[in-house]
Amino acid sequence: MPPPALPPRPRLGHDMTDANPISPPFRNIKLVLAYDGTNYHGWQEQRGVPTVQQELEKAASRILGHPLAVHGAGRTDAGVHAAGQVANFRTPNFSIPLTNFRRALNSKLPDDIAVRSANEVPAEFHASISAIGKTYCYRIFRRPLKDVLLSRVTCHYWRPLDVEVMRRAGVRLLGKHDFRAFAYSAEQRENTVRTITGCQIEETPEELRISVSGTGFLYKMVRNIAGTLIEIGRGRWDDRRIDVILASRDRSYAGPTAPALGLCMMHVQYPPNAITLPPSQRPEVDSTGEALP
């Protein structure tokens, strides 16, 4: 079976990445991004409001000299952050070394968006379609007095939480389940079965961090899991409530949706062959053999 092609997406102007407006040779560029999502209405382009995708496309187009469409690994919601969002785009521009491109791109992006790395990947790589797993982290600040320096990236919840019960509840989420009860209440997709591969809760004197890994997620699923675990931790339910929620397939059985500001996309996982290039196309390396970021 041939590898999946980049899906066409309606664009304003001449799109150099979709609908076959260019033919090889071209470069397929993979970006790893970090951003503070406070000022954005999520990742995906929307008319009339700022989004991360729009800012990235605008800056990259100015540098490369042609319109382009950037494809993201996940559509983070309004106010959600990222430390390891992955994106890709195609360009026929071979004149700019990737190290220079990354620096130029960061100079044109707003201060709350940064490109951590830029590498050339095989033509069939797609940030979303090629992904085999993602990890999100939900941060809860636990001191009675909120920390204003962390207030944009943590949810402030100062009441006592039973962390061990929350951990037991997290274990019950592992595996392949129908997560419709943890989806957005207006979820329309017929298939709401997903696989959770990890759910860890780390505790510090000031924070609780809930890390959830899986092969895929439904809209607001991680925030609904976080809100449910908080309810369990504060004593509203015991850990067996997770089984009841999953069996119900009813959003009203789970806890409230945790605020967006506490959530961060940490990492996107790909099979090794999805990002491995032949020697002639491998990223530039420095004198130590390390790939240049």
Image: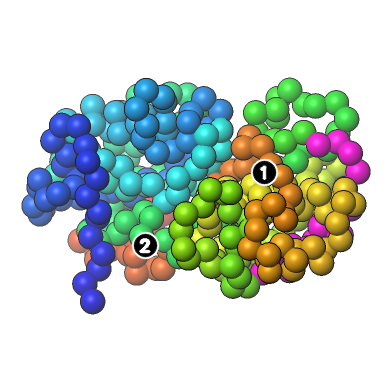
What amino acid is at disc 1? Answer: Thr
Point out which mark residue 130 bears.
2
Q: Is residue 164 magenta?
A: yes
Residue 135 placement, left or right of 292:
right
The span from disc 2 to disc 1 (Cα, nearest Å) is 29 Å
The N terminus - image quarter: bottom left
Kindly identify which residue carries mark 1.
257
Q: Residue at x 77, y 53 (%)?
A: 229
Residue 256 vs 212, above or below: the answer is above
Specify the quadrant of the image occupied by residue 57: top left
Q: Please provide percent x and percent y for residue 282.
A: 28, 58
What amino acid is at disc 2? Answer: Ser
Residue placed most toward the observer, 36 or 92: 36
The C terminus - image quarter: top left
Q: Earlier in the sequence, mark 2 or mark 1?
A: 2
Task: Write down the region rendered in magenta.
Answer: 157-174
Residue placed most toward the observer, 260 or 85: 260
Viewer-nearest of discs 2 and 1: 1
Residue placed most toward the observer, 283 or 61: 61
Residue 169 placement, left or right of 36:
right
Q: Residues within 10 Å of mark 2 (few under 14, many from 20)?
A: some
Q: Please provide percent x and percent y for residue 53.
A: 37, 36
Q: Please provide percent x and percent y for residue 223.
A: 64, 47
Q: Residue at x 36, y 60 (%)?
A: 129
Q: Residues within 10 Å of mark 1 (few under 14, many from 20)?
A: some
Q: Is residue 178 magenta?
A: no
**What is the image's colouring?**
rainbow
Residue 272 vs 99, above or below: the answer is below
Residue 186 placement, left or right of 44:
right
